[in-house]
Structures are given as C-alpha cells and as structure tokens.
Image (cartoon, rainbow, N blue to C red):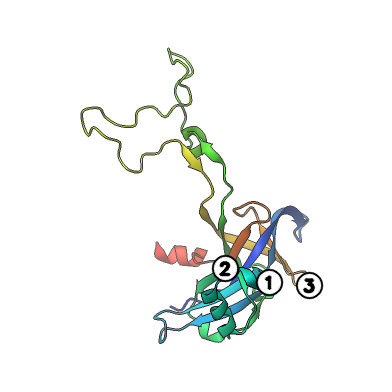
Amino acid sequence: MTKQIKGVLGTKLGMTQTFADDGRIVPVTVVSAGPCVVTAVRTPEADGYSAVQFGYGEIDPRRVNKPEAGHFAKAGVTPRRYLVEVRTDNASEYTVGQEVTAEAFTAGELVDVTARSKGKGFAGVMKRHGFRGLSSSHGTQRKHRSPGSIGGCAYPGRVFKGMRMAGRMGGERTTAQNLTLHGIDSGRGLLLIKGAVPGPAGGLVLVRSAVKTPATVGEAR
C-alpha cells in the first residue's frame, strides 16, 4: 500500500473561532502555512528511501555555513532557516525548486501537526504526570504533593530507570494526530485546523497528511 503524504511548514498564529454550515461555533487554530520550497527529492535508487525535503523561512545568507550554502545553491534556491524531510511514496511528483503552499491541502481532510510543546519549566509529579498526591488528612505532614515511594530500600537498592518523578516539563517534540482541516484561506496562505495544536503562538509547526486515519485504525484491529 503506497502512502502519499503531503506536508508544509508554517507558523502557528493562535486560536480563534469560526462557524460551521449549521451555525455551530468551531474552535480553530490558525497556521500561516508556507510558502515552502522543495530543496531536495530523495529516491530509493540514490538515497535508499523516498522523501521530499522542504525549506521554510527567510535567513540572512551570511548566517549559513558553507555546506548548507552549497546545498541551497545546488537546488537553485535562496537559503532557508528551516529544513524538514517528509517521507512519501510519491516524492517523484515533486521537483527541486517547486513552491508548496497551503493550497496543497483540501478542506475536510485529516492532518497531523508536529511542533515543540510549550515549556513549563521544572514541575512536580502532580502537574507533570497527573499524580493524585498524598492524603489531605490522617497525619500527612507537608507532603501532600510529593510522589511517595520511588523504590525499595534493600532490594533493588536503586531507583529504576524511567521512574516518573519531578523534572523539566514541556519543550518536547509533540504530534497531534487526526485533526480536521476545517478551512483554507488560499489568498493569505492560512490553514484553519479544528481544535488546538502543540506549541506557542509564533512557533514552527509541521502540517502533514494524517498517518493513522480512522479506516487504517479499523483495519489494524
């Protein structure tokens, strides 16, 4: 089964609301998508896999090192701030230097949105992992938000790797799957995605075709 994945880099502008055809309010996230430029096309014969590489965002050419400058010069495009590869079986349909905008998508289809989540700083286990905390009564002394036991004393005599504890929260690569693309403003290059997407306003986001569509999930079961 071939997978034809479309993708575009953009900037999250924020959230607003719009109206459906039946008058219901629909919360949407506005993403300024592209314009992106194809900087490379990966083929199984030359690279061992099929993918397309997009460049997005302006950058001063003086801030690009020589290997990157040579890569952009070979593609015949001006240097871009961000590069991303999207694996797809129809990579041969793209050409180097081709511009990709919000028009690559159609309203109503499902998309996956990848971004770096908001950084929350150092957080305790209740906020970070959803622990219930200790009892509010029965002799608990100023330990209401503590994690409790993190391991045995004599055996195993250490804390297991992966133990959920307090630490830095957020700031990680996160993907929200199967979001509905509510609408497209081709004139301004905007995507209206139903619901919330990861990351702060002004952050970089990757919008691509959904990998796990409902039909695919049903077939897997």
Query: Residue sitting at 63 percent across and 71 percent down?
Result: 62
Q: Tell me which amino acid carries mark 3.
A: Gly
Query: Residue sitting at 49 percent across and 64 percent down?
Result: 212
**What residue did someone put label 2 on?**
208
The x, y position of residue 215, in whole percent, is 49, 67
The x, y position of residue 147, in whole percent, is 42, 29
The x, y position of residue 197, in whole percent, is 61, 55
Q: Tell me which amino acid carries mark 2.
A: Arg
Q: Is residue 169 above or below residue 83?
A: above
The x, y position of residue 152, in whole percent, is 26, 29
**What residue did someone put label 3 on?**
187
Q: Quadrant of residue 101?
A: bottom right
Instruction: Give the Cα distance between marks 3 and 1.
Output: 9 Å
Task: Evaluate whether residue 56 shows in this view.
Answer: no
Q: Is residue 168 above or below residue 135?
A: below
SS class, disc 1 = helix
Camera-nearest residue between 49 and 27: 49
SS class, disc 2 = strand
**What residue did someone put label 1 on?**
102
Camera-nearest residue between 125 and 132: 125
| Quadrant position of the C terminus in the picture | bottom left
Does 118 sit left or right of 12 as displayed? left
